[in-house]
Amino acid sequence: MAEYFNQFADIFRTMPFWVYIILIIPALLITISILGRINNVHRVNRVIKSAEVFESAEAFEERRKNQPSISGVKDFPGCYILSNTKTGKEYVGQSVHVLLRVHSHLAGSGNHMVHFAILKGNSFAIRVMPFEGSGFKNLNKMEKALIKKCGTYKRGYNRTRGNN
């Protein structure tokens, strides 16, 4: 066994420097990519856990009217998830004014499939997540990560994988 190790070590000792570079750089890039994906998964899980949850549109509207401050500000940039309580299908969206945007969805403006489900009598639970403190570089990246995590492009109401 020691013989094989010594032969292997001899091969590495006799290699030119540029061969090390060719072997090491791709390995580092792959490692950085994997670590970035892992970090993104943790970031998304943390954002979803920190979301403010409203069990119904009525609860959201009551809170919005009576206590317009969520997360310490009147309105805020961030993402939201609308969850159909009957079918389980979800919609992920983003806005610089999350509360106003969710309100407009509930009033019939926005994703037509969500609006149609509301007209059919389906109720929606709502989760709102502020961008601030999320760890994402911008709202687009946050929304894309949530769409991927929730699977709303394939199994939900989202028609795209998120903004670019």
Image (cartoon, rainbow, N blue to C red):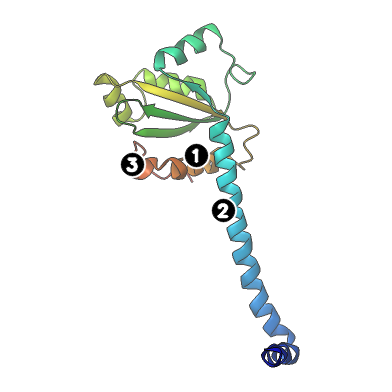
Question: What's the residue at 40%, 17% (across, down)?
Answer: 57
> How far apart are the two marked residues, 1 and 2, measured between alpha carbons?
15 Å
Within 10 angstroms of label 1, few (less than 14), some, or many (20 or more) residues?
many
Of the two numbered discs 1 and 2 in the rendering, the one whose residue sits closer to the viewer: 2
Q: Is residue 138 above or below residue 100?
A: below
Q: Position of residue 147 (x, y in %)?
A: 44, 41
In this view, the residue in front, 29 or 87, is 87
Eyeballing the image, is 153 above or below 10? above
The residue at 38%/33% (across/down) is 90
Query: Which residue is labeled 2 in the image?
Result: 37
Q: Earlier in the sequence, mark 1 or mark 3?
A: 1
Residue identified by numbered label 3: 155
**Where's residue 1, x and y in %?**
67, 89
* Secondary structure type for disc 1: helix
Front residue of this view, candidates 91 and 104: 91
Residue furthest out toward the left: 120
- Give the residue type at disc 2: Arg
Residue at label 1? 143
Residue type at mark 1 is: Glu
Residue 116 lies, in percent from the top left, at 26, 25
Q: Do the CB atoms of the residues marked 1 and 2 lie less than 8 Å apart?
A: no
Q: Is residue 108 left or right of residue 11?
A: left
Residue 162 in sight: no
